[in-house]
Image: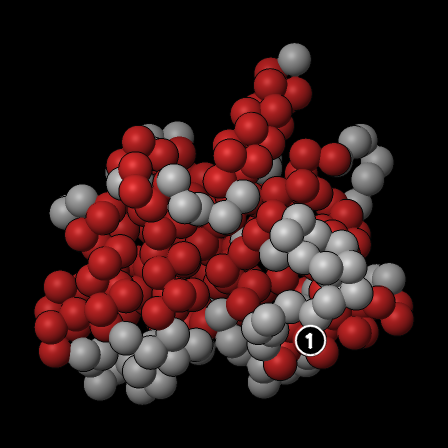
């Protein structure tokens, strides 16, 4: 689904609704109209909130009236949100688009605010802002959207105190009550801890996965923010060589940047 968000930014023209573009790509993914898939086939794995949200989006065609509802606070929309952080350079639009693209499937406020804060941090990092300063910008977004020190704000603060290497050896700390098993705020906390870790991208992502539980999604979310910090060159060649859609992602990203520079 990250590919769907990326292609939405690639296709965007003045007057378009990027959330609607992303939602339409999500429906294509759902029905197998996707590279490497048989038309009409269902995804091998799809979360409950994602399935519910896409069913509602297919019925309404409205990104703002889809979503699985309050109480569904998995990490699915956080995992796919990073193209907004990379390609939307207007800070206010970045927040708005992060929220609306999340709402297609995950409209619980913890999910929408987490995406906005995460993408704000990503945007700062690719501008070579130091991680600590980038995180402060994310905290400001969370505080504004939550009108105070709400759960997303608190999860970012928690992330600042976590040690990835220690948890890789000993398991999640008690403060991560869900044990990193798919709750959006715990995945966000891990990503914050990861970006403050001074080791290499490879060592950090391996340790995030070693923590266990929802390893693929936690690794993707932490890997995205680390890529924004360290750049594509920091990704081990053996990982890049097997990354699904890797060459397409690279070419599409370059095309978006070229269009913005024109």
Decide if residue 128 is on the left or right side of residue 42: left
Task: Please provide percent x and percent y for residue 59.
Answer: 88, 71
Q: In the image, what residue occupies the spot 54% across and 67% down?
A: 76
Where 235 falls versus 45 (above or below)?
Answer: above
- Say what secondary structure mark 1 lies in: helix
* Residue 58 appears in the figure: yes
Query: Residue 187: percent from the left, percent from the top?
Result: 38, 68
| Figure check: 228 above or below 104 | above
Q: Residue furthest top?
A: 262
In the picture, the quarter occupied by the N terminus is bottom right
Question: Where is residue 105 shown, x and y percent of the image?
Answer: 67, 69
In front here: 161 or 146?
Answer: 161
Q: Which residue is drawn at 30% across and 31% down?
A: 233
Quadrant where the C terminus is found in the figure: top right
Q: Which residue is drawn at 12% across and 78% down?
A: 170
Q: Camera-side residue: 56 or 111?
A: 56
Q: Name the residue under label 1.
A: 51
């Amino acid at each position: 689904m990250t590919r769907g968000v990326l292609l939405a930014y690639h296709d965007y023209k003045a007057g378009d609704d990027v959330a609607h573009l992303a939602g339409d790509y999500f429906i294509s993914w759902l029905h197998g109209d996707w590279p490497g898939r048989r038309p009409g086939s269902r995804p091998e794995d799809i979360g409950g909130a994602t399935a519910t949200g896409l069913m509602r989006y297919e019925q309404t065609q409205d990104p703002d009236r889809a979503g699985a509802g309050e109480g569904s606070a998995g990490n699915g929309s956080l995992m796919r949100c990073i193209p907004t952080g990379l390609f939307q350079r207007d800070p206010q639009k970045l927040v708005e688009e992060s929220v609306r693209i999340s709402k297609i499937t995950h409209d619980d406020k913890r999910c929408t605010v987490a995406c906005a804060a995460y993408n704000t941090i990503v945007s700062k990092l690719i501008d070579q802002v130091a991680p600590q300063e980038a995180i402060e910008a994310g905290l400001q977004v969370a505080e504004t959207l939550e009108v105070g020190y709400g759960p997303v704000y608190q999860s970012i603060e928690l992330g600042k105190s976590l040690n990835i290497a220690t948890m890789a050896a000993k398991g999640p700390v008690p403060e991560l009550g869900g044990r990193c098993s798919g709750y959006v705020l715990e995945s966000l906390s891990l990503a914050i801890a990861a970006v403050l870790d001074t080791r290499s991208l490879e060592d950090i992502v391996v340790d995030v996965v070693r923590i266990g539980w929802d390893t693929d999604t936690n690794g993707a979310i932490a890997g995205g923010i680390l890529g924004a910090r360290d750049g594509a060159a920091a990704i081990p060649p053996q990982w890049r060589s097997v990354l699904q859609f890797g060459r397409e992602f690279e070419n599409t990203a370059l095309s978006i940047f070229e269009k913005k520079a024109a």
